[in-house]
Amino acid sequence: MKRLCFLIFISFLFSFSAFAGGGWPQPKGHGFFKFSQWWLISDQHFTDTGLLDPNVTQGIFTTSIYAEYGFTDRLTGILYFPLFSRTYFNNTVSATTGEILTAGEAINGVADTDISLKYGLIVNKPVVLSATLTLGLPFGESQGGTAGNLQLGDGEFNQMLQLDAGTSFQLGKVAAYANAYAGFNNRTNGFSDELRYGIEAGTGFFGSKLYTIFRLYGISSLKNGSNRNNENSTSIFANNTEFLTFSPEIAYNINEKWGVSATYASALKGRLIFAAPSYAVGVYLNL
């Protein structure tokens, strides 16, 4: 089978953040909490050379909680917890006889979890700067299904250091902000280390009741790993995955505390990643 990979955690971390995240830590005692549903279904993928190839239809559905809480005005704790995830692939059927060549399978459970600490290096200035340390905890099953190729995690403990720089400004009567980030992800268990990067811009309308947000983000593999276990399988978490993704989001504040959002994300180019869009909807609470 061709080498495959979902853009799971990157889409999670950055398409679920709505107004939270970026260069701004949460003020002391303030928080942002989001309950989200994310899904992706695909019957084609980018190969290791960046070309498109078909594959048996595969998908993943994940229900998650994302939370930020300000311990001080500079230090914020962050949690991404996928409390339920389902990944599957359909039957492989002969095009000539209609015979089922390989039966479809699915697994369910908790997926890999991220915990982070963000520290505001520069706060209350026209341009703010923060540093975030993220630990990726291998809670998800890494060898599920008959062939061991269904996964809710990659089985490795990773550590990522990220810098965010952000600014807010006015466009006439419209409130706006922009943010850029770069990060280094140190992976274990023979997986290649990664460089992660992105830019984001958003505008608030109708007294900041309605936000439109646009993100462009990506991963580049350093290709310095020794793990070859996933390179010839239908693994969710392949080694040496690369992509550049565009992701718009719309978020609406129902009142001062509660809001809803919807997100779309699509890989503009990639290697070892599904060539299909992902979607997310969520409900969030601002404290």
Image: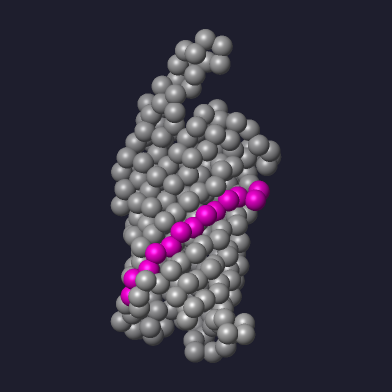
In terms of image quadrants, where is residue 194? bottom right
Is 73 above or below relative to 81?
below
In the image, farthest residue toward the bottom: 125
Instruction: Give the image's coloring scheme.
Output: one colour
In terms of image quadrants, where is residue 74? bottom left
Is 116 above or below relative to 42?
below
Judging depth in this view, the residue of 92 and 130 nearest the camera is 92
Judging depth in this view, the residue of 105 and 169 nearest the camera is 169
Left or right position of 231 against 148: right
Left or right position of 185 against 78: right
In the image, farthest residue toward the front: 206
Q: Is residue 258 magenta?
A: yes
Judging depth in this view, the residue of 208 and 280 nearest the camera is 208
Left or right position of 275 against 142: right
In terms of image quadrants, where is residue 286? bottom left
Name which residue lies at 49% across and 19% down.
93
Image quadrant containing the C terminus:
bottom left
Which secondary structure dominates the residues rendered in magenta?
strand
Is 157 above or below relative to 238?
below
Q: Which residues are magenta?
A: 257-269
**In x, y percent, where is residue 120?**
47, 81
Name which residue lies at 56% across and 11% down.
96
Q: Is residue 133 visible?
A: no
